Amino acid sequence: MVCQEELLIEKVCDLYEQISSLETLKPCKNVDMLFTELVLTCMPPSPIDVTKLPKTIQEKRSHLIRLCGEAEGYLERHYSAILGSYQNPLDHLHIFPYYSNYIKLGHLEFSILSQHCSHVPSKIAFIGSGPLPLTSIVLASNHLPSTTFHNYDIDPLANSSAEHLVSSDPDLSNRMVFHTSDILDVTDDLKEFEIVYLAALVGMNKEEKNRIIDHLEKHMAPGALLMLRSAHGARAFLYPVVEPSDLRGFEVLSIFHPMDEVINSVVISRKYHVPKHSLDQGLGSMILPNKCSEIQVFNPLRSLNHGNMIEELTIEDQLM
């Protein structure tokens, strides 16, 4: 009998061939249908470890992630333009097909942050905000009504579109700042943020992602939190995976793998208070003081409804 993993890989590869042969990845009936089928194929919980797949499948996965990123960019630009045509764009965010996912993800990430920081952050950086900065909008509107969000994107057109979306809102237009920069060129400014978010598709493969993480580690303030999005199981065909070992110089606090329609896993870590070279000399497992609250073990099943979270990594787990 053919195992489920083989059927999954066969299905993903078939969709990959169809998607890679498309003339355009801009939103249209055929594009929408294929990507919806891909997401539904990869969504169910799966024990598959994509790092152990044959090289040919690994190459297809890497290319598929880039295709997903390109299609996602087109989708966001398309809906940002539609929303921007309204007098009050923020009143119509529900027309974006995945808006409800962002609401759930925002709730999840805020709940995780609340367990690791005792005070309301004054400034948050979001790297890779794009033309439709829904994470910043959801967090600023629903969870952090006094926090300023600094949104970084390399694309000036994306920032122009995003800024237009919030311009009609007196509150958000004052608390949403947009920077057109390659994050690898941003240095001293990173020290100003208590929390830094890294979007899932900033760094499309492990090498790119690790280069960005190392840059953040070098320039973020000691004790600042880094929130990343990753993927688990078959969902790793859609997004890059961030492993705890990739977070050199950071103390990994928790990893959460939702099992519902929220696709991204959430990884939260804290920059150590000692220099990176000291960690390399054996201090990496120390529990260090931090400017937020003491680390609390957080059971998301008690307060969130995201299916069964299938992994939680806490400080206690790392020291065993």
Image (cartoon, helix red, strand yellow):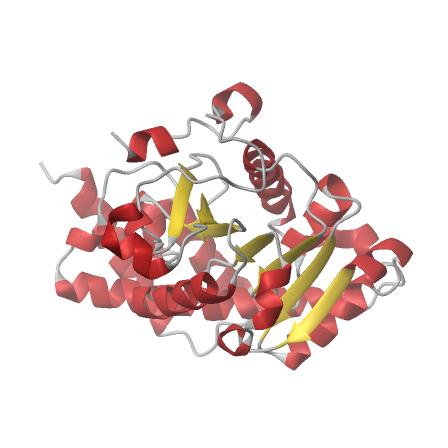
The residue shown at (46%, 28%) is 307
Question: In the image shown, does 280 or 183 lie closer to the viewer?
Answer: 280
The residue shown at (36%, 38%) is 44
Q: Quick check: can you spot residue 118?
A: yes
| Residue 245 locus on image (x, y percent) | 28, 51
Would you place residue 58 above or below residue 118 in this image?
below
Relative horizontal placement of residue 33, taking residue 44 as reference (left or right): right
Question: In the image shown, does 228 or 159 lie closer to the viewer?
Answer: 228
Relative horizontal placement of residue 121, taking residue 263 as reference (left or right): right
| Residue 179 locus on image (x, y percent) | 67, 73
| Residue 164 locus on image (x, y percent) | 80, 69
Please tell me in which quadrant of the rendered image residue 18 appears: bottom left
Relative horizontal placement of residue 54, taking residue 133 as reference (left or right): left
Relative horizontal placement of residue 9, taking residue 219 as reference (left or right): left
Question: In the image shown, does 59 or 11 lie closer to the viewer?
Answer: 59
Q: Quick check: can you spot residue 311?
A: no
**Residue furthest left in the image:** 1
Would you place residue 216 above or below residue 26 in this image?
above
Question: In the image shown, does 294 or 201 lie closer to the viewer?
Answer: 294
The residue shown at (72%, 53%) is 137
Please tell me in which quadrant of the rendered image residue 43 appears: top left
Which quarter of the figure is the C terminus placed in? top left
| Residue 2 locus on image (x, y percent) | 11, 40
Q: How many marks?
A: 0
